[in-house]
Image (spheres, rainbow, N blue to C red):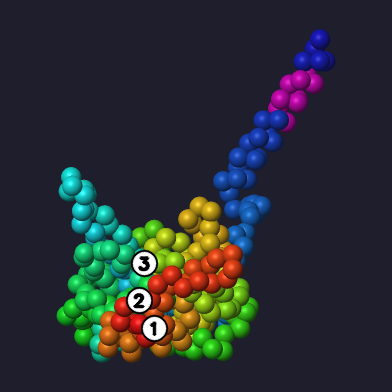
């Protein structure tokens, strides 16, 4: 019994000494095993990233938010309907803004909000439902109004990188990127007409993006975002834009006539089992 107690006592004595040494060591100047924090170095931006950043900085101030208001017209004086889309300043001297015709719809009031948050009234200069284009002019614009530079849609290639800037879901100055997925697409406009030679892109386009610019990586306007193909109404990676060269051709007529004049014969034709049949001739038309 005495022997067992002695062994236990000796063990406790050495345990106490060991604990005391550990406490002493932790409080003294003895070296300890501390984990060194690793040095974190940010990866430099790639040349492609720098190009996109420059393109965004050069163009985003020209992108505007287009807000619309349509007064209630039912017998009960229904609540006014409000809408929103995007647009882009294409001429700072004339304060011209191009957007989609379907963004305006039947609006009785239209205003644009610039990148700095200031809102301005506009005049409607012209519109063309067939190309889904509308030209607005800012009333009393600021002297430092920024405008986008025109590109050329004739030389576009499938696979070419593109940028879309707009106001999806009211989130202003939103940038998305993608590529040109296809060229020469045919889609149906809001008035039922077929729109030809349309750009297809996988850059995310959502409600509120309509009328915003599609840009090349130099920040030049190559198209106007106009529609998406989606089951939900949100981006599914299939968006469409009106080529900038179509816009260039339409602008002189929108400015001079307020619309785009297209050749027409002046007849209405229907399909029958025997082939096309003349239904009637429009009064005052070339066929009259």
Q: Secondary structure at mark 2?
A: loop
Label 3: few (<14), some (14–19) or many (≥20) C-alpha neighbours in 10 Å: many
Q: Which residue is mark 3?
A: 102
- Kindly give the residue lying farthest to the top in the view shown: 1
What residue is drawn where x is 20% and y is 80%? 141
- Kindly give the residue lying farthest to the front in the view shown: 274
Q: Secondary structure at mark 3?
A: helix
The mark nearer the N terminus, 1 or 3, is: 3
Q: Report the quarter where the N terminus lies.
A: top right
Q: Is residue 30 magenta?
A: no
Q: Which of the two residues, 216 or 122, is positioned nearer the viewer here?
A: 122
Label 1: few (<14), some (14–19) or many (≥20) C-alpha neighbours in 10 Å: few
Is the stretch drawn in magenta largely helix, strand or loop?
Answer: helix
Q: Report the quarter where the C terminus lies.
A: bottom left
Q: Which residue is mark 1?
A: 287
Q: Secondary structure at mark 1?
A: loop
Q: Which residue is mark 2?
A: 282
Give the magenta-colored segment's residue range: 6-14
* CB under 8 Å between discs 1 and 2: yes
Q: Position of residue 224 (x, y in %)?
A: 43, 76
Say which of marks 2 and 3 sits in front.
Answer: 2
Corner quadrant of residue 12? top right
Residue 183 lies left or right of residue 56; in this view the side is right
What residue is drawn where x is 75% and y is 25%? 10
The Cα atoms of the two marked residues, 2 and 3, are separated by: 27 Å
């Amino acid at each position: 019994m005495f022997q067992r107690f002695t062994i236990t006592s000796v063990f406790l004595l050495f345990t106490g000494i060991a604990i005391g040494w550990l406490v002493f060591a932790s409080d003294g100047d003895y070296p300890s095993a501390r984990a060194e924090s690793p040095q974190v170095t940010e990866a430099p931006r790639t040349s492609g990233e720098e190009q996109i950043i420059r393109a965004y900085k050069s163009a985003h101030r020209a992108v505007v938010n287009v807000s619309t208001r349509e007064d209630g017209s039912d017998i009960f004086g229904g609540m006014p309907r409000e809408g929103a889309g995007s647009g882009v300043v294409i001429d700072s001297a004339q304060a011209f803004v191009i957007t989609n015709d379907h963004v305006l719809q039947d609006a009785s009031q239209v205003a644009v909000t610039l990148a700095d948050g200031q809102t301005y009234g506009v005049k409607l200069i012209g519109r063309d439902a067939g190309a889904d284009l509308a030209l607005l002019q800012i009333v009393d614009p600021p002297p430092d109004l920024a405008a986008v530079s025109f590109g050329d849609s004739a030389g576009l290639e499938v696979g070419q990188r593109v940028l879309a800037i707009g106001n999806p879901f009211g989130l202003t100055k939103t940038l998305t990127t993608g590529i040109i997925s296809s060229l020469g697409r045919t889609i149906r406009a809001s008035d039922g007409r077929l729109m030809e030679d349309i750009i297809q892109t996988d850059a995310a386009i959502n409600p509120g993006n309509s009328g915003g610019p599609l840009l090349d990586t130099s920040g030049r306007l190559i198209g106007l975002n106009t529609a998406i193909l989606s089951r939900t109404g949100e981006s599914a990676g299939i968006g469409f834009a009106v080529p900038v060269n179509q816009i260039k051709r339409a602008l002189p007529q929108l400015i001079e006539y307020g619309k785009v004049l297209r050749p027409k014969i002046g007849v209405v034709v229907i399909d029958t089992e025997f082939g096309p049949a003349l239904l009637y001739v429009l009064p005052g038309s070339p066929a009259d």
